Image: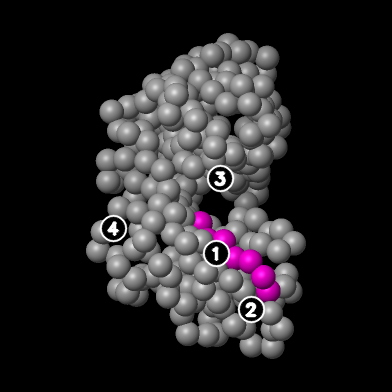
Amino acid sequence: MVSFILSPTARTYAKDIPIVSMAVDWFEELLIEYKGIETAEKNNYKPFKPHSFSAGNYELEMDHLFLEDEQLFFTLLVKGGDIADSVYKEESGMLMMDNYPEINIESESFARNPNSVEGAGASMGIQRISGKYYIMAKYTLYIDPNTVHEFIKNDGNTLSFSVEIDGNKANVDIPLSNTKIQLGKHFVQNEKIELQNSEAPFTVQKLVVYPTRMELELTGGSQDAFLKMVSNIYLQDEKGNKYSLRVLQVNSDSYKLESLSTIYFDEKVKELTLNDGINKGVQLNITEE
């Protein structure tokens, strides 16, 4: 089974967020970071509906599920159990817990080929909402693209999970909504970036524009030159809008960068440049898939 256990990163949120039902607007702060998810949902792209369920004395809700070429992203909201008794406030005002519950999520939809799952990431924090304490977590599961395409082609109507929290288990099936899953738009580049005082140039290999993010792949250069450049690198469209990039992956001869914003739904964007803060922007191809 594909399984990963949270190593919680404690984080708190600036204010209480009023809710009508469980997990309506609590994602507000995370959407500031992941603008692409907000953009997708504003464009009525939400392929999977929120799903509430129970495991022992815990109530949980999975939401913001987006399956793309090589990753599955979702959020989890948890209340009940011993959460309220374990929460305390530091002098800084940050909410902490004595003991986070152990949360183990198995992705049964991709369990038939566990070697296709290339990693996972998760973080969690505590929030007090309407007098109650919640654990809020975000997950990213990295999957081989061929496995994702196979899943969508053959049986992509339901995402299935096995969730265990402090020994309490629940099976979760989340059906596909009426919104068809949209995969990334792949654009081949093969453009050079010449850096000052660098022996070898970088080559921009490809740009992938997803409904919730953008991913850029570079090769060549050197890691030293990359590290010097990366703090200044960003994408910019012809209207002057900037899309910051963060490091996603560094290998010996290739580098992946990710923007948490996207131009996927903006048909008015016709030009996109890659800027390193030194050279004139490199014009990227966003017209030929």
Residue 64 inside the magenta-drawn segment: no
Amino acid tagged 1: Gln
Amino acid tagged 2: Pro
Q: Is residue 242 left or right of residue 101?
A: left
> Which circle, 4 or 1, is nearer the viewer?
1
Label 4 sits on a secondary structure element that is loop
* 4 or 1: tag closer to the N-terminus: 1
> In front: 80, or 208?
208
Q: Residue at x 59, y 65 (%)?
A: 218
Residue 89 rendering spot, x and y as whole percentages: 62, 41
Give the residue at mark 1.
205
Residue 58 rendering spot, x and y as whole percentages: 55, 18
Q: Is residue 230 above or below residue 266?
A: below
Q: Residue at x 34, y 46 (%)?
A: 40
Distance in Å between CA atoms under marks 4 and 3:
33 Å
What residue range appears in magenta? 215-221
Decide: marks 4, 1 in contact (CB < 8 A)?
A: no
* Residue 259 visible to the viewer: no
Distance in Å between CA atoms under marks 2 and 3:
42 Å
Label 3 sits on a secondary structure element that is loop
**Quarter of the image where the N terminus is located:** top right
* 3 or 1: tag closer to the N-terminus: 3
Give the residue at mark 3.
12
Distance in Å between CA atoms under marks 4 and 2:
31 Å
Q: Is residue 249 left or right of residue 178?
A: right
